[in-house]
Image: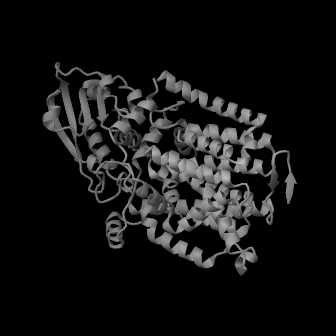
Amino acid sequence: MTTATAHTTVIRPADLTLRDTLRLAAIFAAAKLLLQFALTLWTLHLGYGYFRDEFYYIACGRHLAWGYVDHGPIVALQARLGELLFGDSVFGIRVLSAAAGSAMVFLTGVIAWALGGRRPAQALAMFGVIVCPQYIGVHGFLSMNSFEPMFWMTCVLAVILMLRGFSLRTWWVVFGVAAGVGLLNKPSMTFFLVTLGLGLLLTKQRWVLFSRWTLVAIALIGAIVSPHVLWQIHNHWPTLEFLHNGQVRHKNIVLGPVQFFLAQFATMQPVNALIWIAGVVSLLRAKSIRDGRWLGLTYVLFYALMFAMHAKDYYLAGIYPAMFAAGGIAWERRFAGLRSVKENRVIGFPVFETVLLVTSLIILPMASPVLRPDAWVRYTTALHLHGDKMETFATGPLPQFYADRFGWQQEVDIVARTYRSLTPEQQQHVCIFANNYGEAGAIDFLGQREGLNLPPALSGQNNYWLWGTHGCDTNVVIAVIEDTPQEVAQKYESVEVVGRMDEPYAMPFEHKNIYLLRSRKPSSHFDWADERFYF
């Protein structure tokens, strides 16, 4: 039905009651949750362990703060809550990421309803999101990216409902909280909010911005984010230094316009392009989905901004659920004559959904490590599949997303064996130094989890540098570093190679010596400030 307002004519969703929509969305959300749980358990069975960044996020969760060098505070809180609620097993620390994926699927269904879609549109949108490789990947491990679509889609839903005549007061407050917490999760939400605002300003739906409740939302965002900004100021804006270093050192691969566009097909599942592209077009045309052009413009503007900034291709992932919701409606309206659509069936497009399922199963090993490493190499070689390479580091037989789950136990075993060889006095003061946060995080986590009682690890990378040296003595050091024995001998009188990280499936830069170093030379003065490496 339609209701007139002082600004425009708004259309409330029809055909399904909200209760029916929530029930259907809950079923698909539960399916997503079970899928992620099953994949995690299966990959553990195959021998894949903790991912490099998970060690780091757990360490950050044990040092809770309002900010971190290379990420916001939400992922650290996520890690801490995961540990407290579900334990520190691989499965336990990934529960909340899987739950965030479930919430994303739920919101996709509700957005399809809010845009006017019936059961076939909602189901197609949610099914497309569930089989998307990008989401299977990020919701399968502890990551800040797992929560990003949930925050973005909450904001989108809030705007849609306000445009449909729902309470401005309620939904601007919801918008403000979601946007504020989303900014604490990942700063890229800033660009999403800017393009969303521009999308509204460029269309007649701009009226929703001119309300006193909009100011309340802005105030909420400012209040939520202000402690993080104060932390950045207090620590001399380390995140800006981190971003600058990544740019000048060419950390990420820069994609051309064609590569960047084609990467969206790969990350979203190639067959899924028939859904999300239809969604973008239908929103821009604003015929089958009335008052939707602002959302289509938001996507176009955000896409252009991310490409101009040389962002990684997956940085657009947070906005796609809304495009799937619109695409589901476009399919529903285009094939309204199908019997399954007329009868409002969940499986409204059986042939297409079957093709989508089959192709998703074929490329599933690219999203989740469901094959043993040697089998993965044979499978992807036979099918000419390859993983996206987003950073300039050299890779081995496995893409980094899989390779970074190997080698950590070997590292910690060598470090622990060396630590036990020291005298009790040396054990009290030894420094355990690692090149990067993954190595340091593995030592901290596995060293404590397995009762090895290792002292805290040191690293100059990112937040590990801010945590300092813990008062250790740099005259006795267990070092996990890339330097050659000759290079290390310039700083220490005694250099002993106690082991080597040589796990064949780990990243090439994780093939390195582990040293026991004694008696730092007077000519090589140690200054912790020189170890800072924000990258």
* Camera-side residue of 25 and 121: 121
* Camera-side residue of 14 and 405: 14
Q: Residue at x 51, y 61 (%)?
A: 268
Q: Residue at x 55, y 48 (%)?
A: 302
Residue 153 screen position, x and y as percent: 64, 50
| Up/down of 271 relative to 418, above or below | below
The N terminus, quarter of image: bottom right
Residue 285 screen position, x and y as percent: 66, 60
Q: Is 409 displayed left or right of 422 in the figure?
A: right
Residue 467 screen position, x and y as percent: 41, 28
The C terminus, quarter of image: top left
Give residue 473's quadrant in the image: top left
Q: Residue at x 57, y 52 (%)?
A: 300
* Camera-side residue of 4 and 204: 204
Give residue 127's quadrant in the image: bottom right
Q: Is 332 displayed left or right of 471 in the figure?
A: right
* Camera-side residue of 85 and 248: 248
| Up/down of 366 relative to 75, above or below | below
Q: Is 376 displayed left or right of 207 in the figure?
A: left
Residue 172 screen position, x and y as percent: 74, 40
Task: Tell me if I can see residue 516 in this picture.
Answer: yes
